[in-house]
Image (cartoon, rainbow, N blue to C red):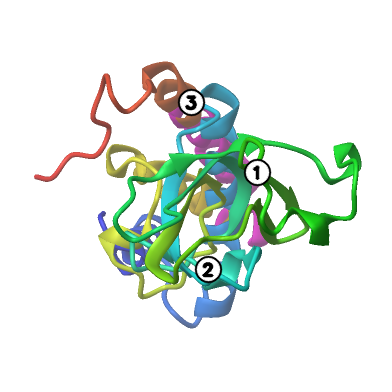
Amino acid sequence: MDTTNQITTYVRRRTFSNSVSYPNADALIDLNVRYRRVITAITSKVQDFFWTWGSSDTTTTQNEYTIDTFTFGDTFERDIISIDSVAVKFRASNDYYKLNKGAFSALDFDFSNYTDWAGDPFYFVNDTSIFIAPNPLENVTGGLRIYGNYRPLDLTLSDSTAEIKIPLLYTYILAEGMCADYWMSQGKYEEANVFEARFEQGIEKMVKSLSIRDREIMSYNY
């Protein structure tokens, strides 16, 4: 079950339902509720499991860069929730320089005075923007990089393997949860409880097997 369409088809077969008795709109709601629960379970075990990096072009007149200007290696849209590190090329010929993390409240002067700051380069994050000082010395394509964690976006019923961000070995957990939701909606509480227990057992098994990705690969292709 490597796509959301396959998951939904499997659920309908397990529950003797179809697109009329279990409409796509209802299936999608249930799928994403379960998806979020699985994501939460993963991040409670490995905080940086959903880690990524992206880059943005820099200009000499700009020291604020909003998250939506960054391009990520994964072409699917990201919902960045935390920034771990920021690096910048002050000139195109330079290497990336890792900036020190600062805070707006700790500045001695107004931030506009730091465009040509001669001290240690730094950054801080406010709202959905990254602020850097000093300004780049040249316009550089891909000159600013951020590294951090993201929340996987909600799924659709036509998503591919690449868009499902939990380990593919455990996508069956989503199906167990959807089966529970379907039977609950039909008033079949005994059947619902069986699948709910399978969902919880699947999460427990998955969480126990999780590890930081540089030690263990969690996605398998058959």
Q: Which mark is residue 201?
A: 3
In-image side of 165 versus 125 (left or right)? left
Residue sitting nearer the eye, 140 or 219:
140
Q: Which secondary structure lies at badge 3? A: helix
Q: Residue at the spot x=50%, y=25% of the render?
A: 46
Q: Amino acid at mark 1?
A: Ala
Residue extent of the magenta highlight: 182-202
Q: Amino acid at mark 3?
A: Gln
Q: Nearer the viewer, mark 3 or mark 1?
A: 1
Which numbered disc, 3 or 1, marks the residue that appears first in the sequence? 1
C-alpha distance separating marks 3 and 1:
56 Å
Q: Main secondary structure of the magenta part?
A: helix
Give the x, y percent position of residue 45. 53, 22
Which numbered disc, 2 or 3, marks the residue that appears first in the sequence? 2
Label 2 belongs to which residue? 27
Screen quadrant of the N terminus: bottom left
Label 1 belongs to which residue? 118
Q: Which secondary structure lies at badge 2? A: helix
Q: Amino acid at mark 2?
A: Ala
Whether residue 76 is in magenta: the answer is: no
Give the x, y percent position of residue 101. 66, 35
Counting other residues with Cα less than 10 Å from the Cα at mark 1, is it few (<14), some (14-19), or many (20 or more)? Answer: few
194 versus 54 height, above or below: above
Screen quadrant of the C terminus: top left
In-image side of 110 versus 23 (left or right)? right
Residue 73: tell me if it is visible. Answer: yes
